[in-house]
Image (spheres, rainbow, N blue to C red):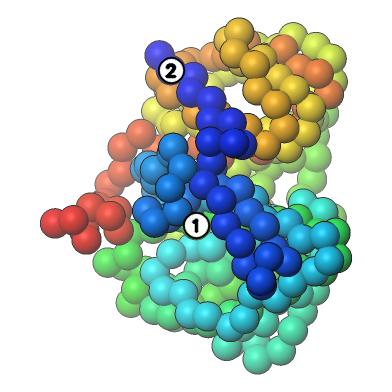
Amino acid sequence: MSVKITTKDNQAKGVFAGGAILENKPIGFPQDGGEQKPYSNLFYWANAWSDKGGLIGEHPHKMFEIMSFVLEGEIEHYDSKLKGWLSLKAGDVQIIRSRGGISHAERLLENSRIFQIWFDPNIRESMLKEATYDDYKSEELLTVVENGISTKNYVGNGGPIEMDTEGIEIKEFKLSNENKQLQLDLSKIHSLYVLGGTVEINGQLANADDFIIVENESEINVEADNVRLFIISVPQKLSYKTYIELVNN
């Protein structure tokens, strides 16, 4: 049984656009440092923000599925299929299934924040397909309130987002001042990012921007103080070899 917390201070860091865009990375690239390495089919996770706005110029992607969650403000996106710019606002989500290859650029506008998260599909299959992407607007992502917990499902459990990567569930919880027991799937590794507030999980305290991994637990005790939790669940075991496994072999 395991609950592991990586504080924001111990996460990898990143800088883009001459310092206009800053990042803390719960899961960084190998060269980024930080405590947590990729696991299962969760390859990379960055929390990026900009006070004044900044541009990440056009660059290529291949193989991975890349998701951008607009947490605050607004971003603009360009890619080599669309050949034009479009806007995503707070609450919106984009998925790029980069597959055989695509290039894109992104601009964070003033006072904006996003998650960018990379997933590792079966690249032996996905690389043979043409790249695609989809945007999902905030109003497409329904929130359900049950037993005092507000839940928004992005992927799985009725969430609208379709992925190549197997076994992914993504949701967001909001809890006020209360103590709850959350049931978990033992076949998955659960990754939690504290978007706001404070929370105790099985007696361990986590604050805003801390990252939590829960493994081999069928339930956890959550004591919340107006907390907002972003949760990704990935399989303990995959039916294919990951990118890292293929490269290392």
**Quadrant in which the C terminus is drawn:** bottom left
User: Does residue 221 appear left or right of residue 38 in this picture?
Assistant: right
* Residue at the image point whose x is 65% and y is 87% from the top: 82
Q: Position of residue 198 (x, y in %)?
A: 75, 22
* Residue at the image point whose x is 66% and y is 71% from the top: 18
Residue 124 vs 7, above or below: the answer is below
| Of the image marks 1 and 2, the number of the one nearer the N terminus | 2
Q: Position of residue 141 (x, y in %)?
A: 76, 50
Q: Position of residue 34 (x, y in %)?
A: 46, 43
User: Does residue 227 appear left or right of residue 12 in this picture?
Assistant: right
Q: Where is residue 45 in the image (x, y as percent from the top left)?
A: 54, 50
Q: What element carries label 2?
A: strand
Q: Do the residues labelled 1 and 2 touch (CB within 8 Å)?
A: no
Q: Name the residue under label 1.
A: 118
Residue 236 in view here: yes
Residue 137 in view here: no
Q: How many marks?
A: 2
Identify the residue at the far bottom of this view: 83
Disc 1 marks a residue whose amino acid type is: Trp
Q: Name the residue under label 2.
A: 2
Q: Residues within 10 Å of mark 2 (few under 14, many from 20)?
A: few
Please give the label number shown on residue 65: none
In which image quadrant can residue 176 be found? top right
User: Does residue 106 appear left or right of residue 133 in this picture?
Assistant: right
* Residue at the image point whose x is 31% and y is 43% from the top: 238
Q: What element carries label 1?
A: strand
Disc 2 marks a residue whose amino acid type is: Ser
Q: Residues within 10 Å of mark 1 (few under 14, many from 20)?
A: many
